[in-house]
Amino acid sequence: MWYLIIVAAVVITWLVLDRPILKIQFKNGKLTSIKGHCPPTFKHHLKDIGDSEPFDGMVKVYQLRTGAKLVFSTQVPKKIQQRIRNVFPHQGFKTLNQKVKSR
């Protein structure tokens, strides 16, 4: 009985803690899956980066109060990480503190 409660607590904690707003997986430089809203220009740049230098891995985008945060899996080379950071559209992802002004 106790093991069931512990397993349920671990699963619930895992579901609550890892909530990216965008998750992109790569296999041999190709986009295999995209979960969440990916701006079209960012997707185009990711395809170009993957075509020029094939790699495997995953990119997650988390929403923080200060803006979006990029998290890369360990398989993504540092050079590719920097190229992705350079083309990432920070204006496309709103911060939590921004409010829409309507007139």
Image: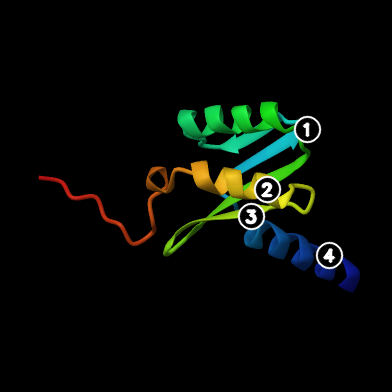
Find residue 57 and report its horizontal and vertical position in percent: 76, 43
- Coordinates of residue 48 in the picture (x, y in percent): 60, 28
Disc 1 residue type (three-letter): Lys
- Gap in angstroms between the C-alphas marked 3 and 2: 14 Å
Look at discs 1 and 2 and give the one toward the viewer.
2
Pointer 1 residue = 27
Q: Nearer the viewer, mark 4 or mark 1?
A: 1
State which tag comes first along the sequence, 1 or 2. 1
Q: Amino acid at mark 3?
A: Val
Q: CA distance from mark 4 to mark 1?
A: 32 Å
N-term-proximal mark, 2 vs 4: 4
**In the rendered structure, which amino acid carries the disc numbered 4?**
Val
The residue that label 3 is drawn on is: 71
Up-down relation of residue 18 to residue 53 (above or below): below
Q: CA distance from mark 1 to mark 3?
A: 17 Å
Instruction: Tell me whether the residue at label 1 lies in contact with that at label 3, contact meaning CB atoms closer than 8 angstroms.
Output: no
| Lower position in the chain sequence, tag 3 or tag 2 | 3
Residue 66 appears in view: yes
Q: Residue at x 43, y 64 (%)?
A: 65
**From what the image shows, is residue 43 above or below residue 61?**
above
Q: Which mark is residue 7?
A: 4
Residue 1 can be seen, yes or no = no
Circle 2 — which element? helix
Q: Earlier in the sequence, mark 1 or mark 3?
A: 1
Q: Quadrant of the C terminus?
A: top left
Task: Report the residue that reaches farthest toward the left.
Answer: 103
- Which residue is denoted by mark 2 in the rendering? 79
Q: Are marks 4 and 1 in contact (CB under 8 Å)?
A: no
Residue occupying image coordinates x 79% and y 30%? 28
